[in-house]
Image: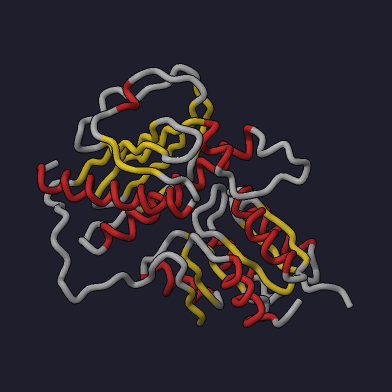
């Protein structure tokens, strides 16, 4: 059985690696994108994504705009998206919820809790 | 900026900087004065700007390259350690974490910031000049790689905007590490 595939979208390579290491250790396959534009492209090219973990503040296209773009095209209505960000403002969280996000994690994150959050939404790897 | 506002910001920067560097496995303690006003080689500078209706400015972090390299969180597969690009990226993320924490703290005081994305660079003969004592926080790393860490918050509050004491009952909507599910 193929491992479930999770995409991490963050302009920081270090964060992408931190998330990737945590998820790979739990058995998930991880793909990366460095900003919202690349994230949207990879949602299209990676047909079997199980979940997206996405930063908010990124160049070219921020995470909330990427979330809206992914949900708007209607091809992945049930693809869960968790925002992983330093942001904690209630207004932004409400925007993400309204746009279809399934969760919000405030950085810095604990790897074991991130893995638990992924398992909660998509099950074990 | 009024002195009371400067002091609130300075205290916030001090505390947040101490907490963020600790969370990044960089032990640091406060140092008096501006030890970053002397030119040093082998430095990394990370910048992240902010704006909005309430305030504008920039957060700058200056730290020894070796310090950040040794504290890089990703183990290298070949044992050679992180390269320059890795260290610069990490410095930018530290600046992002720090300004995010500062932003969340002062939001409780009615001041909202919209933050940008970080940039970082390597520098030789780098020093911070012109920072007032109320805007720069200097820490000294307590680990094996010594050297001052400068955290400079250069901020301008819009007229009429003050860092009011928040109501006693108010708490942060979300804190670092919190998870919300919808």
Q: Measured along the vertical axis of the image, is residue A59 above or below residue B88?
A: below
Q: Tell me which residue sits at (27%, 61%) in the image.
A: B107
Residue A3: give x, y in percent of width and height. 82, 73
Q: Nearer the viewer, residue A116 or B67?
A: B67
Residue B120: give x, y in percent of width and height. 51, 35
Q: Tell me which residue sits at (42%, 33%) in the image.
A: B62
Residue B142: give x, y in percent of width and height. 42, 40
Residue A89: give x, y in percent of width and height. 36, 66
Instruction: Pick the quarter of the image with the N terminus of chain B.
Output: top left
Is residue A77 at least partly visible in the picture? no
Q: In this rendering, would B94 be left or right of B80?
A: left
Is residue B14 at least partly visible in the picture? yes
The residue most toward the right is: A1
Q: In this rendering, would B8 be left or right of B63?
A: left
Q: In this rendering, would A109 be left or right of A74?
A: left
Q: Tell me which residue sits at (30%, 22%) in the image.
A: B129
Q: Nearer the viewer, residue B3 or B156?
A: B3
Q: Nearer the viewer, residue A69 or A102?
A: A102
Q: Tell me which residue sits at (20%, 45%) in the image.
A: B157
Q: Measured along the vertical axis of the image, is residue B167 above or below residue B63?
A: below
Snapshot quadrant of residue B167: bottom left
Q: Nearer the viewer, residue A2 or B27?
A: B27
Snapshot quadrant of residue A101: bottom right
């Amino acid at each position: 059985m193929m491992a479930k595939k999770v995409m991490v979208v963050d302009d920081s390579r270090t964060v992408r690696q931190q998330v990737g290491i945590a998820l790979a250790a739990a058995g998930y396959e991880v793909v990366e994108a460095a900003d919202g534009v690349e994230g949207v492209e990879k949602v299209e090219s990676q047909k079997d994504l199980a979940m997206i973990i996405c930063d908010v503040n990124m160049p070219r296209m921020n995470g909330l705009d990427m979330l809206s773009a992914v949900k708007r095209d209607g091809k992945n209505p049930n693809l869960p998206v968790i925002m992983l960000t330093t942001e904690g403002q209630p207004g932004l969280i409400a925007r993400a919820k309204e746009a279809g996000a399934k969760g919000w994690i405030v950085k810095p994150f604990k790897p074991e809790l991130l893995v638990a959050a992924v398992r909660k939404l998509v099950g074990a790897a | 900026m009024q002195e009371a506002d400067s002091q609130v910001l300075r205290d916030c920067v001090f505390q947040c900087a101490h907490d963020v560097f600790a969370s990044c496995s960089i032990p640091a303690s406060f140092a008096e004065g501006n030890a970053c006003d002397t030119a040093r080689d082998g430095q990394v500078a990370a910048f992240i700007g902010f704006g909005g209706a309430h305030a504008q400015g920039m957060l700058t972090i200056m730290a020894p390259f070796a310090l950040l390299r040794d504290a890089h969180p990703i183990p290298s597969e070949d044992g050679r350690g992180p390269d320059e690009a890795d260290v610069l990226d990490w410095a930018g993320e530290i600046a992002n974490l720090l300004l995010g924490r500062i932003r969340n703290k002062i939001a409780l005081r009615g001041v909202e910031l919209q933050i940008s994305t970080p940039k970082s660079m390597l520098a030789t003969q780098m020093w911070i000049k012109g920072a007032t004592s109320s805007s720069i926080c200097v820490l000294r790393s307590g680990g094996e790689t010594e050297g001052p860490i400068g955290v400079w918050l250069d901020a301008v509050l819009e007229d009429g905007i003050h860092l009011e004491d928040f109501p006693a009952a108010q708490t942060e909507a979300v804190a670092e590490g919190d998870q919300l599910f919808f």
